[in-house]
Image (tube, grey):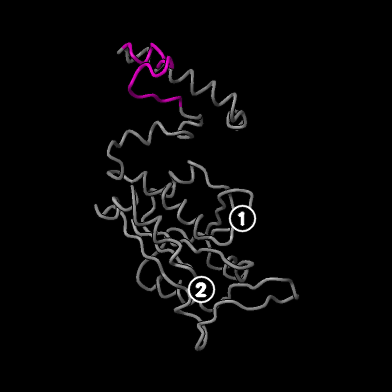
Amino acid sequence: MRIDILTVVPELLESPLGYSIVKRAIDKGLVKIHVHNIREYGKGFYRQVDDYSYGGDAGMVMMIEPVYNLIRDLQKERTYDEIIYTAPDGEILNQGIANELSCKENIIILCGHYKGIDHRIREHLVTREISVGDYVLSGGEIPAAIIVDAVVRLLPGALGDETSALSDSFQDGLLAPPVYTRPADFNGWKVPEVLLSGDPKKIKAWQDGQALERTKLLRPNLLDD
């Protein structure tokens, strides 16, 4: 898989992409992640990438030419399955979307910034718009990092135990059951006996029941969906 991230603040992505599972996946050759500074395509001596909006609204808007030219240069080298724009009014990221994107080969993630991006980019180049929640952030770099993390961890070989992702919350539409580790008794707080029984069928039945109960209590909307 290859992921190209387009941003006006590439420094914001250094830490999320440089550690943990994403870094290990890069080192293993499972994914190639390239961060592109849109300012390199900016106008004039100051590499301008933003301008005032038509209509007089407050706030600056990302200009069309730098983003268009960068995307077109990337498309000259390969075909992209998705060009994703991180936008607060996009579809809310969920596990199903992450699963779907993990099967793609080449993805562009365009990070929104300022008041937004010239809408013609969204109309003519973007294939998918994704939000990480109903709130507004200073830019799309953090959402881009979240999308990358959610997708890359699903790639075969990214996790030490490939079956681990299968038991994550939301994979089966439910929240994950509680998990415990040693010691079995800490300050009188005990691990449920069934988990110590060594009986896989009983353990699985307990986990399924707990997943359902936690979902009913904490996220009943998932059962409605």
Whether the magenta-drawn stretch holds residue 117 is answered as no
Q: Which region shows up in magenta?
A: 177-197
- Residue 65 position within the rendered picture, expressed as x and y whole percent measured from the top left: 54, 79
Left or right position of 59 against 69: right
Q: In this rendering, is residue 155 above or below 60?
A: above
- Residue 139 position within the rendered picture, expressed as x and y whole percent measured from the top left: 56, 62
The residue indicated by pointer 2 is 67
What residue lies at 39% left-to-right and 19% top-to-bottom? 186
Q: Decide which of 20, 223 is in the foreground and name it.
A: 20
Identity of the residue furthest to the left in this view: 28
How far is disc 1 from disc 2 in space, using C-alphas?
19 Å
Identity of the residue furthest to the bottom in this view: 45
Q: Secondary structure at mark 1?
A: strand
Q: Decide which of 142, 62 is in the foreground and name it.
A: 142
- Residue 89 position within the rendered picture, expressed as x and y whole percent measured from the top left: 63, 55
The residue indicated by pointer 1 is 88
Q: Secondary structure at mark 2?
A: helix
- SS assignment for the magenta stretch, majority: loop
Identity of the residue furthest to the front in this view: 187
Indicate the quadrant where residue 208 lies. top left
- Residue 2 position within the rendered picture, expressed as x and y whole percent measured from the top left: 35, 59
The type of residue carrying mark 2 is: Val
